[in-house]
Amino acid sequence: MALVWSLLFAVLLQAAEWEPLGPEGGSVHILAIDRAHPATLLAGTRSGRLFRTTNAAGTWSALPLPRFPNTTLHALAIDPADPRRLFAGLNDPTGKNSALWRSDDTGGHWQRVEDLAGRAVLSLAIRDTEPRLFAAGTDRGVYLSEDQGLRWRLISPEGHPEMNGIVSLALDPRQPGTLYAGTTHLPWKTADGGATWTSIHDGMIDDSDVFSILVDATRPGRVYSSACSGIYASKNDGAVWLKAEGIPADNRRTHVIAQDREYPNLLYAGTTAGLWKSADSGATWKKLLGATVNSLAVDPRDGRVMYLATDGGGVLKTMDAGRSWLGRNSGLVNRRVTSITASGTSLYATTMYEGEYGGVFISKSGGRVWTLLADAKRLHGENILKLRARGAELIATTFNGRLVSQDAGKTWAYKPVRTPEPPPGKVRGQTPFEVARSALTPAVRLAATLGGLERSTDSGKSWNRVTKGLPAGFVRAVAFHPRNAGECYAVQYSRLYRSTDAGQTWEFLPGGDSSMLLVSLFVQGSLIYAVSEDQGIHRRQIVQ
C-alpha cells in the first residue's frame, strides 16, 4: 500500500509541474563561444535568462543564473583555459544587485564576485595568452584580475567623469599592458596596465557609443571598433580611425564586429538593421541578412560556421559563411507572448515586436510544436495585443484598431471599429490587469489588480476584495473554467491558486518555478495554460 501511495504522489507531483511549450526563439542579447570546444556556447537574454548548448546549438538548456527584478544581463565570458568557469555581468538600476557572477561548474552553481558587488558589469574580456588577464568594464571604470577572476582591482582613474559606462573592452594579445575601453562617449586606451589612459577618438564622430572593439591578432597595429555611428578601423593602434563607407545610415548602429581567425581579411558586423560582411578588411561591405543582430560568434576552427543573437529570431546559425541561415532555438524561449486562445483543436498564441520572426503562431499539438502563421508583414506591421478565435475567424486587437482573418490566419484585413471595445475602467480606483467573467454565471466577475483580487456579483457595479485563501497584495491574472461552474484560477507571481466557488475562497496549488512570473491564464478542458513574462507559454494538468 505504501508503494501505491508513493507512486500516486509522484504522478500527482509530476502533473503539478508546468510543462514549457514555447514558442521557441525570441530575443537573445549576447553570445559567448568556448574557443577550445566551439560546439559549446552560452546565450543570454537582456532580462537575465541564460542558456547553454554543447552540441553546436542543436539543443539549449537553461542555467540557474540568479535573477532579480529589473536586472539586466550585459556580459558573458567562458574561461578559455577552463571552460567550466563562466562569468556573467549584471546591472541593476538601483545598484543593489549589480555584480559579476562566477560559476566553476559550467553554470550549475553561481557565486557573486565580492570585489565587484554593487558595480554594473557591462563588458568582459579575457586575454588567453601568457600572462593571462581578465578585464571587466563597469559603470565606474575598468577592473583587472590576474588570478582567473577571483580578485579584482580598479585600473582606471577613480571618479573619472568620462571613463564610466565601459560597454566594450579588448586586451591586446601581443602586448600584456595594452587594453582598449569603449564608453558611451568614445574610446580610451592604456599601454601600461592602467597607470595612464589616453582618449583615442581622432577620426570618430563625437559622442559615439563604442559597442565593441576588436584587436587584429594577425596584424600589429590594426584595431577595429563598432559604434552607434558606424564601423571604424585603425592601422596605428587606435591613434587615428577611419570610418567605413558604403553602409546606409539606417544600418550604421553597429553592436558588434568580429573576425575570422583563419582568414583575417574577413570581418562581420552586426547592426540594428542587419549583418554585414567584408572580405577586404573593412574596405567594402556586403549585407548578408536583415535581422537585428545584438551579438555574434564565429567558430574559431571553421569560419563558415557562425551564430547570431537576434531580436525576435533567437539564435540563428549558418554553416556556409552566411549564404543561408536557420533558427537554432530548441529549448531556448524568450518571447513576449501577449495572448493565447483556442478554436477546436487549434491553439493560437501572439507575440509582439518580433518582425518577421513573430506575430501569430498556431499549434495543432496542444502547444508542443508551433508554426508561425502570420508575421509583421502579413499583419500590416501591427503588433497584436489580444486574439480571439471563432472557428476560422480570428479577431486581433492592435494599438491601432482590429485586424480580422476569415481564413484561419492566412490573410488579414483591417476591420472598421463601429463600436470600440470599452476600456476595462477602474475597479475600486485601480486599473485591473485582467477581468474575467464566468460564462455560466455572467454577473460574477473577478478582477486581478495591483492591490489584490476583486470580486463582483452584479456585473461589475460593485466590488469586494477577496482575502480567504489568497495572500494579500498583487494578483496578476485570473481566469474561469469555460465549462465547470465555479471553477477559476488566479496567479500571484509564480504561484497558482484555485477556487471552486466562483472566487470566494482559494487554495494554493503547489508546483512551478519561483523565477517564472506568470502574467495571463487560459483554461481548456483538463489543462491550464499560463503565459510568463519572458519564458513563453507553459501548461499543466488540472489535478482535482
Image: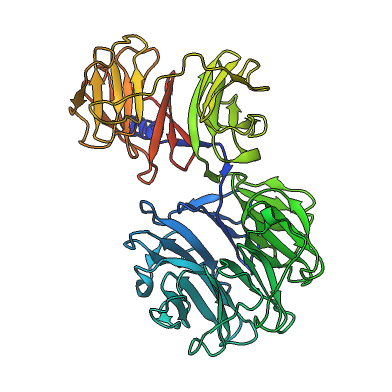
Work out whether 73 lies above or below 385.
below
Q: In which quarter of the image is the C terminus?
A: top left
| Residue 431 versus residue 91 in the image, above or below | above
Residue 343 position (above or below residue 112): above
Q: Work out whether residue 12 can be spotted.
A: yes
Residue 457 in picture, x, y percent from top left: 24, 13
**513 or 43, which is in the foreground?**
43
Side of 163 where 37 appears, left or right: right
Q: Which colour scheme is used?
A: rainbow
Closer to the camera in the image, 202 or 454: 202
Image spot of residue 239 (x, y percent): 65, 83
Residue 423, above or below 170: above
Name the residue at the front extreme.
206
Position of the N terminus by quadrant: top left
Residue 350 lies in what quarter of the image? top right
Residue 245 left/right relative to 95:
right
User: What residue is rendered at 66% in x and 75% in y?
Assistant: 203
Residue at 60%, 68% (x, y): give it.
Answer: 212
In the image, 511 versus 407, the foreground residue is: 407
Residue 85 visible in this rendered orientation of the protein:
no
Number of callouts: 0
The picture places residue 412, in percent across and down from the top left corner, at: 64, 22
Residue 509: give x, y in percent of width and height.
30, 32
Identify the image quadrant of residue 541.
Answer: top left
- State which quadrant residue 429 falls in: top left
